[in-house]
Structure formats: C-alpha cells, structure tokens
Image (cartoon, rainbow, N blue to C red):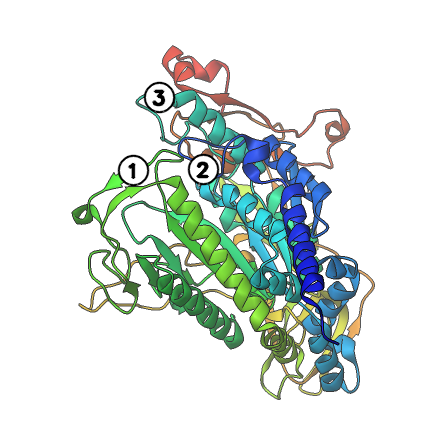
Amino acid sequence: MRMHRPALLSLALSLLFLVSARAAVVPAPEEVLGFRPGDDRKLASWQQVLDYFKKLDAASDRVRFEELGKSTMGRPFVLATISAPENLARLEEYRQIQAQLADPRLLGRDAERKAARLIARGKTIVLITCGVHSDEVGSYLSSMLIAHRLASSDDAQVRKILSETIVLLVPSLNPDGVDIIKDWYDQTLGTPYEGTEPPLLYHKYVGHDDNRDWYAFTQAETQLTVENIHNAWHPQIVHDIHQQGEYGARLFLPPYMEPVEPNVPKQIVEGYTELGNSIAAELRASGFKGITTDTTYDAWTPARAYSHYHGGVRILSETASCKLATPVTIKFEELRGSIGYDARKETDKFKPLWPGGEWHLRDITSYMTAAAFALLRHAAGHRAEWLQRFYSIGKDAVRPRRRGELSGFLLPPKVARVRNVGGVLRTVEVVATSDDGRERLINILRSGGVEVQDISRIKVDGKYRDEVASLIRMDQPYGNFAKALLEAQHYPDLRDQNGNPQQPYDVTAHTLSLLMGVTFQPVYAPFEYDFYGAVPYMGFVVEGVDKYPAKLGVYKSHVPAIDEGWTQWVLDHHPIRMMPWLPEAKMPGYGSTNYSLIEDADVSAGNLRAKYNA
C-alpha cells in the first residue's frame, strides 16, 4: 500500500512527538539533583540518589526500582532493573531460563535440545555495580547517567540493548560511604583539605576491604548482593566500575594480567578477554586516550570476583581519579605507569597516549558511561553467544568425573581437644564437640551456591567405611568455587622482563579451610555414599583459662585503619563467650564483648590499666 505524503508526514510527526514526550516525562538527573553528575565540586547524597531513581521508576516503564534490604548503618540498599517493558513483564520467566542454563542437571534428558531453545528465548543478564569504594565518586554518579539514557533514549542502539538484555544496576554497593564521603567533602570545600580522604573508614567495618569480601560474605552489603542478585539471576556479565590513581592510565579494561586462578573456567577467560578488548577498541576509535589492557590487575582470587566461579565474566573498569570532585592538572612528565605499562610510552597494552592536562570529574563520568554502553552494545549484539558460553560453563561443571579424577571433598567432624597446661595448649584427645569454624565454612559455601551433603558411609575403591562427614561433590555448578576456598594456593613465581620478581597486584591466598581450622580429605572417582540425617559439628575446647571476658580497649586513630574496623566487626558480630556450659553463662550479658574505642586523648591522659585489661 502506498502512503500519501500528508499521511507520511503525520506519522513522522507522531513518532517525533512520542520520542519527545518520553524524553519530557523521564527526568534528567540535574532536574532532581540540581546539578549534572560530573559537575566540578558537586556530589550527591544517598537520599538524592534514591529520590532520582524513585522518580525514574515512576516516569519510565523501562525501570523497576526496589529496596533489597539495609546497609550496615541502616540505609536502603537498592537495585534498578532496566529493560524493555515486555521483558520486565516476564522477569520470572527469564530468571528461570538463567537458572536452568546455570545448572544443566535441571534440563534432564535431551538437555542439548532444551538448552538450545532456552538460549533462543533468553536475554543477556548484565549486572552493573557502582560505588563499592566510596571515594571513587564517579561511579555512583555515573549510575544515574547510565540509567537515564536507558530509560529515556529511543535511538536504535538503546532499543536493541533494552530488547536483548536485562540490566541489573546497583547505584552503590556501599550506600553508607556515599554520605560519609559527601559530608567530609562538603565540610572541607574551599579549605586546604578539599579533596582529601576523610579521617574515618568509608565503610564502618572494612573500608576498602568491602571489595575483598566476595568469598567470605561477612558484610551486609555483600550478603544482599550475593543472595538477591548473583544467586537469583546468575548474570553472564558483571561490570564493576572503579577508579584508580590519577597519575597512571586514564582507563584500565580486561583482559587481566597473569596470574589467573586455576579454578576459573577457560570460557570465563575467553569471555572477559573478548569483551574487554572490544570495549577498549570502541573507545579508542571514539577518541578516548590513555587506555590500558592486560596490565596492573589480575584474576587470581574470588575475593574480588564472585562471578568468575559462578558462570559470569567480571569486567573491571578503572578510570583515573581527580581529588574526589575537585579537578586536577597533571603534566605529561608526571605520569607514571604500573605493572605492565608506562603511561608515557605507547605500546599494544597502552594506547593512545594521553598528553596530560586538566582532569575533571566530567572526564571520569564520560569514560565510565562510554565504557558501560560499549559493554551493553556487545552484550546485546552477541546475546546468543553469551548464553551459549554460560551454558557450556555449567555443562562442564556438572559432567561426570572420570576414574582417578578429583570428585569431591570430605569434611570430617573430629578434631582435637586441647588443654591449657602451664600456659601451653596440649592435645588431650580427639573428640566430638561444637565446631564454629566448620559450621561457618559450610554456611559460606552454601551461601555461594555450593551443595554440601551430609553422609554416614562412603565406598571408595570397592571398600566401604563408616564416615560421618560432609561431602562436597565436584560435579555440581559451583564445585570449583569450593575447591578454590578449600585447597591451598600456590602463587606462581612471576618475573618481569629483567628477570626480577613481579610484585603481586593484591590478594595471593584465600584458603578458608586454613583460616577456619577445618580439615578436609579429597575424594577421587569412583565412589558411592549413603546420606546421613545430620552431621554433628565439632571443634576445639580450650580448658583452664579465665572464664570472665576481658574489658577491651580498641585504638581508633585519626588516620583510617582497616584493621581497627575489622576488629570492631569481630567484636560486634562474634562476641566472646567463654565456657558457655557454666551456670553464670545463662545470666544476662554474660559473654558479651565489652569494649570501648580509645582515641589519642585517652592515651595522653594515661591510666588506661584502670579502665581496661586488654
């Protein structure tokens, strides 16, 4: 049918009106905040961030905004789910598709055919996490820019992203820190201390270590993210947006440098290499400078990369910082490199050169949003490939183990009873007792999706033996996660081009079995076992010590100290309870940890012994 010119003009005007109407009703961040994210010397409070996302949710049928729980200090911990309206109407269907591809055992017979059908129907699930390190302020500010474009734009690229992906956007993994940093920045604005770090941790307990908790799940924010996002959605891609020092590269992207932790599947390495290189190439072609890949950051530990052991690639981006929201000026000769590159020399791993000059918060948010949309375009344009890779990881994980191959781990319950003899702890006997460490380790593994079974008898090499224990099989989706946390790590001897030892980027070990004093026994195929109703937990009993808890003083420096924060966390969450079988243990307050914070003024005043005995 031919359309006459007036009708065609009318249709075009109608479409233009619809696009304009959408843009008009979806508020831009500056309409709510009073400034555009990225403006110099402007930071948003957590309440302002919440207000913006609530207005976005109310105005756009592409956004669902929800509170998942409370942060350590009681602030709302939130998630924005962004996709096409028709996808949001079928979220549970897509979540079930993810669950089946993550665990191919659920597909039963004819799994390949069923998987192909699910892959054809599914969407790429992309988790974008911002603000875990609260002094990296561009990240949480960029979350609003990313969300606004996805909610308001009707260009073809955004429509494809919305159609082919489901974006799970966390504006901040540390809401408390947003306000801690903003309050300090506002207090010091216009003073010699403008742009400095605050004199307290930006997470109450762990400070910077909140991004080293993805294998122990000690903090409320980690627990909320793992339980309600990672384990619920099994994202194929996790984009973790960070900042780094101002004197190096303008942006880091994967691939990661060596070493890669041995339990990371090869498909994960292939995935983050492909995606990281794609983002870097797109940004370089768009004129962004100072981009490095395959340097500085490794993929050695689950402490930073939960998704690498759960079917998803982690795309870490690290953009150069300024002084919080205060711009800096950097001369070219002041630039320096890091492991694998020099910021003043162009190589395959670092290009093109950034000439130096002013560096503003707007530069940071521009790099962050450009990288995020390059990632989303790849996720949308390669939807089927991402789902196929995700399924292949799960299929490899649950395959039957061959004869002689590692098939699982036994966690036996018996440990030593020790006695305090003249100030020396001596083993008295092996006995069944309560074991907090073993129970905690099992709970951590289960929180990470690992299946832990209680058994009463096991058959190995044709022989039965009674073995009351907990069993972790390797032929399950997240057996490699358990393996990484149980076995001791052997960090490789890496050398630079001159033969000198290369300093590790960060964490080199994550052996929770050693940390918690839990023994285990590897089991090799073939083997059989019988289930047991419940396994008694067992551990150390220490006798012959003072039954009354100490009055503790914890030193609090004016310089933030992560060790002090961790000490407070231990005392707050694991109170000292000596000899709970004693009659007085039933009295109110017995065994609670009585501690106070000691500051410099207290030390100067002296006489601490009268107040504290430890």
118 with respect to 313 (left or right): right
* Front residue of 135 and 163: 163
Q: CA distance from mark 2 to mark 3?
A: 32 Å
| Residue holding disc 1 | 328
Residue at left offset 20%, top offset 61%:
345
| Residue holding disc 2 | 563
Work out whether residue 304 can be spotted: no
Q: CA distance from mark 3 to mark 1?
A: 15 Å
Q: Earlier in the sequence, mark 1 or mark 2?
A: 1
| Residue holding disc 3 | 190
Secondary structure under the numbered disc 2 in the rendered image = helix
Q: Are marks 1 and 2 in contact (CB under 8 Å)?
A: no
Q: Amino acid at mark 2?
A: Asp
Badge 2, how many Cα within 10 Å: few under 14, some, many 20+? some
* Front residue of 260 and 11: 11
Badge 1, how many Cα within 10 Å: few under 14, some, many 20+? some
Q: Earlier in the sequence, mark 2 or mark 3?
A: 3
Q: Position of residue 317 (x, y in %)?
A: 44, 55
Q: Label for residue 113?
A: none
